[in-house]
Amino acid sequence: MEFNFKNFFLDHLPGPLNKLDKNFKKLAAYFNYEFNLLVYLFNQIEKMRSLDDAKGKVLDEIGDNYNQPRGEADDEFYRIMIRSKRALNSGKTTVNGLLDIISQSLNVKPDGIVIEPLRSYKHSKEDIGEPLAISIKNIPLQWIDKEWEQNYIINRIRDGVAAGIRVDEISFIDKSDSVLSIRGISSSTLIYKVYENYENKEGA
């Protein structure tokens, strides 16, 4: 229920004063008008300071709070950088923590993003996959257009993985189900490959 300053003011006048006097009602109406202007102003300020709505210098100030410089990023990708830094500061290195870093960074739901170990276990028998290595698949690509933006997200994921775990592959998927696969995450040379996601098309 919206707060009515006029009624609040009249209800809290001392008893001896006549609350029905027209002058008091005019004064209360004026105070109510000014109060609503202040409420609107504070709401606008709060909106400008929120990560989703902040722009320009206000967004830079939010980034400074997380020690995250803007660099060459526009406002849209700078929000991704701030979200990823905020998620990384949580210090969670579990699978769920890594999903949080990815989903919060890109402001997407973690549903569909897959983190798989290279070595799996079936019927108490282990396969020959590499131990302590994982692949991360189906990261939405729509917010990541430039190569440096992809590298930024890759580095954030690399920083969020627990010590001793190697990320073998990271794959991004776009709206047309094309997949950008990136290998060599743990080395200085990244290997890029683009292919169609036939699994999604078969299940459609």
Image: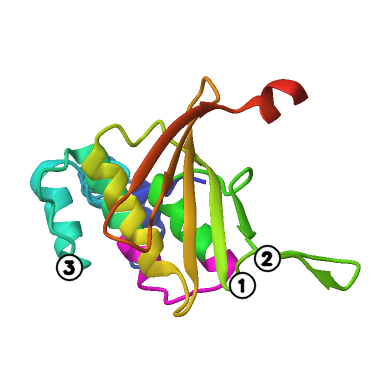
Marks 1 and 2: CB-CB under 8 Å? yes
- Specify few, some or many for label 2: CA neighbours under 10 Å numbering under 14, 14-19, or 20 or more: some
Q: In this view, does 46 lie to the left or right of 12?
A: left
Mark with earlier residue (1, 2): 2
Given residues 86 and 6, the one toward you in this image is 86
Q: How far apart are marks 2 and 3 (CA)?
A: 37 Å
| Residue 117 appearing in the image | yes
* Numbered disc 3: secondary structure: loop
Q: In this view, does 157 lie to the left or right of 80?
A: right
Given residues 160 and 43, the one toward you in this image is 160
Image point 14% across, 63% down: which residue? 64
The amino acid beneath tag 2 is Arg
The furthest residue to the right: 123
Residue 67 disc label: 3
Q: How far apart are marks 1 and 2 (CA)?
A: 5 Å
Residue at image mark 2: 119
Given residues 87 and 131, the one toward you in this image is 131
Residue at image mark 1: 131
The amino acid beneath tag 1 is Pro
Marks 1 and 3: CB-CB under 8 Å? no
Q: In this view, does 58 lie to the left or right of 87?
A: left
| Residue 27 appearing in the image | no
Q: Give the range drawn in magenta.
A: 85-97
